[in-house]
Image: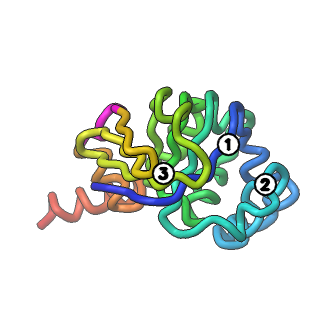
Amino acid sequence: MKAKGTVLKYGDNVDTDVIIPARYLNSFDAKELASHAMVDIDPTFVQRVKPGDIMVAGKNFGCGSSREHAPLCLKTAGVSCVIAKSFARIFYRNAINIGFAILECEQAAQDIEEGNQVEIDFDSGIITNITKNRQYQATPFPPFLQKMIAENGLVNYVNHQKENDNA
């Protein structure tokens, strides 16, 4: 499994309340939520993000409330993966549950810059900064996690497994 895209770069402590501000939580539509993603810290995010783009950030990405909408908001906006020095535990869990790829890699998070072209090989954990011709090693995704992402989350993955068991 691979991802390739242009980098949108952010700093430390990107809070879930910033990813999707509370004033927009009255919508249950993922596209509506995504149309307001990052508006308080990056008013141009929604216009700039393209399907497949990769977010890179510092430490403690997804901190703050346990806002489950935050990973869904980014995924629906088009972000294929987030690379950060570290993630808040609740964001990590929520992202994996919906099949949203996230990787911890301190060296990549520090070195990759806004606008760089990056490719990620989830099988090997290798992150390639095409722009700078550099590679970084993250922990590879185990096969079951890749399947969860391919199935669009935990619920779909479990249902698919049950279908296969009953076949």
Kindly report the distance in space between the C-alpha atoms of the residues bearing marks 3 and 1. 14 Å
Q: Is residue 92 above or below residue 68?
A: above
Q: Quadrant of the N terminus?
A: bottom left
Characterize the magenta stretch by its predominant secondary structure.
loop
Residue 141 shown in magenta: yes
Q: Earlier in the sequence, mark 3 or mark 1?
A: 1
Q: Quadrant of residue 44?
A: bottom right
Q: Is label 2 in contact with label 1 (beta carbons under 8 Å)?
A: yes
- Left or right: residue 48 compared with residue 23: left
Would residue 111 be found to the left or right of residue 158 on screen? Answer: right
Q: Which residue is the site of mark 2?
A: 42
Residue that mark 3 sits on: 81
The magenta-colored residue range is 137-142
Tell me the SS state at disc 1. Answer: loop
Would residue 98 be visible to someone looking at this image? no
Q: Position of residue 68 (x, y in %)?
A: 63, 48
Tag 3 secondary structure: strand
Marks 2, 3: nearer the viewer: 2
SS assignment at label 2: loop
